[in-house]
């Protein structure tokens, strides 16, 4: 056992004395030491129930002969962090989670790990740590919340954000807004649409690091507790068989994840996180590769905000495995890959039939023949940008309009709510990237304001920040290079004509190369912004096409 380094031999007497201080018995000292990474806290709705999940995991580990030990991981609620300086810290926590988990697992020589995450940066951060530590590992999330109901219709957090815009437009009363506040988030769990948290939990299942239902069983279902017990038991099987993340997180597994991503219509943030996780596994994912996968992968699901179905509906329809079974009908998956179930992908999805042809469209009748995400390139985004194509109405797939330029999110929101943005405009929000923010804030507030003001089918938004999975409409984010390093988005002027063609995957401003070069020269003469403290260090983050967001300290 790896843990023999801290528990066996005369030289480890001091180590054993410290385990004695923990109350460990001789029997426990002779069993594999299994770390349970608990993301429980009392500020994130998706994590308030994780103490129950952790207790169930501990029981499962002990039932199969392991010694469970719990240690924490932090998590930020992106919804609570939205729209103020707190969002500058959110993406940075991914690296903090990965680094601290790696430190704990290796410092204490743990034999295996069970990761218990749920929300946005928590899941990818722990997947990155799993790849680094490379001991037998399994994931069990806290699960999605149930959708709320307002006036008989299912609603979610994105509905709440859009309600604020509707109120600003004078089309909703304060009482109606209050009804949304009290009803859209009715239970614990990750928010109920196909937002970033649920996207990453579903992709954890697809890539082979979680059990069936990890991404979809609602947080409040007792089935979630059973899943946690089984995860605790299963990690002991993985330990006995020496199945490690390096065996599961292969290049073909990431191709499966990209394919399922496109079929589900996951959050654009998955294009930040999957490349970062792949990098830790020694694999390179690019936006061009994502487009190649999208071109041959039908989009089978329109979960909120793209449509009116929610995670509980996906669960009832058969979950991620049912989606994968549909994809396998056209041979779009690698099915011979080993997973954390101890079985192959093919064995996992066998017999997992689609039980609801509206929530999961049959492969013969998809929402579209291509995937839910698209990477756009052009003179405005030479290194690429990302849009959730499945959440864009047909009218906005091709759009041209004048640029309305803002150097921060707050100014853009004020203009949108102040009625200064009109149909046809292209809102450009810059200096919100990894360095420019710093921190690459999510732009859910301005996109929700546009939708709430009734302009979701006539106004586009482009940013070097990023978009929440809850965003919908022609919202193009992750524009690279970002403004802070002199990317073309820094050179856009008020009124420049912007052309968007999501079908052709292009994003351009109608400006001559000579004019752009003159603007570049003028930009270089500007004084750079100085940022101090933690965010100053974080401003060394760079965004690259092969990894996504990476910290370089």
Image (spheres, rainbow, N blue to C red):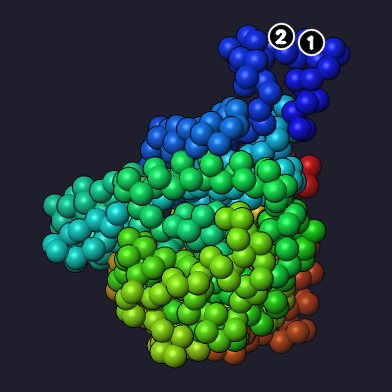
Residue pictured at 73% horizontal, 81% vertical? 515
Instruction: Provide the secondary structure element on which disc 2 rests.
Output: helix
Asked if residue 527 is positioned above or below residue 530 in the image, the reply reads below
The residue that mark 2 highlights is 17
- Other residues around mark 2 within 10 Å, as few (<14) / some (14–19) / many (≥20): few
Foreground: 506 or 190?
190
The residue that mark 1 highlights is 13
Foreground: 301 or 240?
240
Q: Position of residue 108 (x, y in %)?
A: 72, 27
Q: Is residue 181 visible?
A: no
Q: Which quadrant would residue 100 be assigned to in this image?
A: top right
Q: Which quadrant would residue 41 be assigned to in this image?
A: top left
Residue pictured at 50% horizontal, 37% vertical? 60
- Other residues around mark 1 within 10 Å, as few (<14) / some (14–19) / many (≥20): few
**Relative to residue 200, is residue 488 drawn left or right?**
right
Q: Position of residue 530 (x, y in %)?
A: 70, 44
């Amino acid at each position: 056992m790896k843990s023999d380094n801290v528990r066996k031999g005369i030289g480890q007497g001091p180590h054993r004395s410290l385990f004695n201080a923990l109350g460990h018995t001789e029997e426990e000292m002779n069993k594999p030491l299994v770390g349970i990474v608990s993301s429980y806290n009392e500020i994130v709705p998706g994590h308030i129930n994780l103490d129950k999940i952790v207790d169930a995991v501990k029981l499962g580990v002990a039932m199969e002969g392991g010694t469970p030990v719990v240690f924490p991981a932090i998590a930020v609620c992106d919804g609570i962090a939205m729209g103020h300086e707190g969002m500058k810290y959110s993406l940075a926590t991914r690296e903090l989670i990965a680094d601290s988990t790696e430190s704990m697992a290796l410092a204490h020589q743990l034999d295996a790990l069970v990761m218990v995450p749920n929300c946005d940066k928590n899941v990818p951060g722990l997947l990155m740590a799993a790849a680094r530590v490379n001991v037998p590992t399994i994931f069990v999330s806290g699960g999605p919340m149930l959708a709320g109901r307002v006036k008989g219709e299912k609603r979610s957090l994105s509905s709440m954000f859009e309600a604020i815009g509707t109120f600003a437009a004078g089309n909703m009363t304060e009482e109606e807004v209050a009804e949304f506040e009290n009803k859209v988030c009715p239970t614990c769990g990750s928010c109920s649409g196909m937002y970033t948290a649920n996207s990453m939990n579903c992709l954890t299942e697809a890539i082979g690091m979680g059990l069936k239902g990890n991404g979809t069983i609602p947080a409040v279902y007792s089935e979630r507790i059973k899943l946690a017990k089984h995860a605790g038991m299963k990690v002991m099987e993985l330990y006995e068989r020496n199945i490690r993340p390096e065996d599961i997180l292969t290049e073909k597994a990431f191709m499966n994840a990209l394919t399922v991503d496109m079929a589900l219509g996951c959050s654009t943030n998955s294009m930040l996180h999957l490349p970062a996780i792949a990098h830790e596994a020694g694999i390179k994912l690019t936006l061009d590769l994502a487009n190649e996968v999208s071109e041959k992968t039908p989009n089978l699901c329109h979960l909120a905000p793209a449509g009116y179905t929610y995670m509980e509906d996906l669960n009832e329809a058969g979950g991620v495995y049912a989606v994968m079974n549909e994809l396998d009908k056209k041979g779009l998956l690698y099915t011979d890959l080993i997973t954390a179930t101890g079985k192959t992908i093919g064995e996992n999805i066998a017999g997992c039939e689609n039980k609801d042809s509206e929530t999961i469209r049959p492969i013969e009748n998809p929402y579209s023949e291509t995937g839910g995400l698209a990477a756009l390139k052009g003179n405005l985004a030479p290194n690429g940008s990302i849009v959730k194509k499945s959440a864009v109405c047909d009218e906005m797939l091709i759009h041209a309009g004048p640029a309305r330029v803002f150097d921060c999110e707050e100014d853009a929101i004020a203009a949108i709510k102040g009625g200064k943005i009109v149909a046809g405009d292209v809102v450009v929000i810059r200096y919100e990237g990894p360095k420019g923010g710093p921190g690459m804030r999510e732009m859910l507030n301005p996109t929700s304001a546009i939708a709430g003001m009734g302009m979701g089918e006539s106004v586009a938004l482009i940013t070097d920040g990023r978009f929440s999975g809850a965003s919908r409409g022609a919202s193009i984010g992750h524009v690279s290079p970002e403004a802070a390093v002199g990317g073309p988005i820094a050179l856009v002027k008020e009124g420049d004509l912007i052309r968007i063609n999501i079908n052709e995957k292009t994003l351009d401003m109608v400006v001559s190369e000579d004019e752009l070069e003159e603007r570049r020269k003028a930009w270089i003469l500007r004084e750079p912004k100085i940022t101090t403290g933690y965010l100053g260090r974080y401003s060394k983050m760079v965004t690259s096409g092969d990894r996504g967001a990476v910290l370089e300290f």
